[in-house]
Amino acid sequence: MMQPARERPGTAAQKGIGHRMQTALMGWVHQLGTLEYWEALLAGFEGLGPLVPILLAMVESFFPPLPLIAIVALNVAAHGGLLGFLYSWAGVALGGIIMFLFWRRLIKRFFLEGSQPLPQAGKGTAVGEPLRYLVPVHAVAAAPSPPPSFMHFAFGMSDFDEKRYLRAVLLGKGLMVAMMAVFGQSLVSALKNPVY
């Protein structure tokens, strides 16, 4: 005959803690769906000045999984259309320039110029050359689809003209952030004046 399993000491307390954690988590998730939560978040974000939105947009160049469209929409919602666009553009362009120069001036110089010249290395560094004739770099920089960190790596390690790439990043990222800022402004106006 089977004996019923005895409850271990502390199990009831552990179930109580688990239930409280689940309740707190569900309350937090419910808060995310309220307009008041987002208004309070934006009110706190507005008072931080221009450095935080610029750094937030810049971090996306170093850590690509961050959603740039959400960062731009947050900047636009907190600082208005024009300032949100300018802060986001400054952050994205500055982050891209830093990453490109990191790959070009530090890594490429250290690995390629300090090593033995290999014929395969010359083929790999010439990857950006065909793009000069096929696709304008502005279009590549404006597209949100390629990961920006890969683009900065590829052009930083190639023999592509540095000034041309930096100019393309400034213009291309400006166009991309402007499109995202229009979306962010539309989202803000839709939240303020919902039409059902």
Image: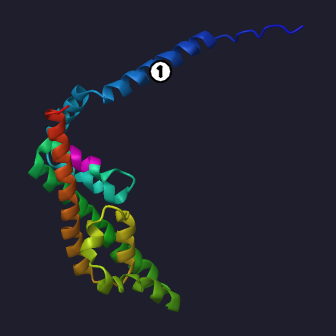
Left/right of residue 45 with respect to residue 132 in the rendered view: left
Asked where in the image residue 169 lies, by quadrant, the reply is bottom left
**Residue count near mark 1 (Cα–Cα under 10 Å), binned few <14, some 14–19, many ≥20:** few
Q: Residue at x 13, y 33 (%)?
A: 193
| The residue positioned farthest toward the right in the image shown | 1
Secondary-structure class at tag 1: helix
Question: Where are the magenta residues, as a range?
Answer: 70-74
The residue under the point 47% across, 16% down is 20
Task: Identify the image quadrant of residue 92.
Answer: bottom left
Could you tell me residue 148's position as x and y percent? 34, 64
Image: 25 above or below 81: above
Q: Is residue 73 magenta?
A: yes
Which residue is located at x 13 percent, y 56 percent?
A: 86
Report whether residue 50 is seen.
Answer: yes
Depth check: 8 or 170 in front? 170
Residue 98: percent from left, percent from top: 28, 66
Q: Quadrant of the C terminus?
A: top left
Q: Which residue is mark 1?
A: 21
In which quadrant will I find the N terminus? Answer: top right
Q: Is residue 105 magenta?
A: no
**As rendered, which of 112 and 24 lies closer to the eye?**
24
Q: Is residue 48 visible?
A: no
Q: Amino acid at mark 1?
A: Met
Q: How many marks?
A: 1
Left or right: residue 18 versus residue 138 is right
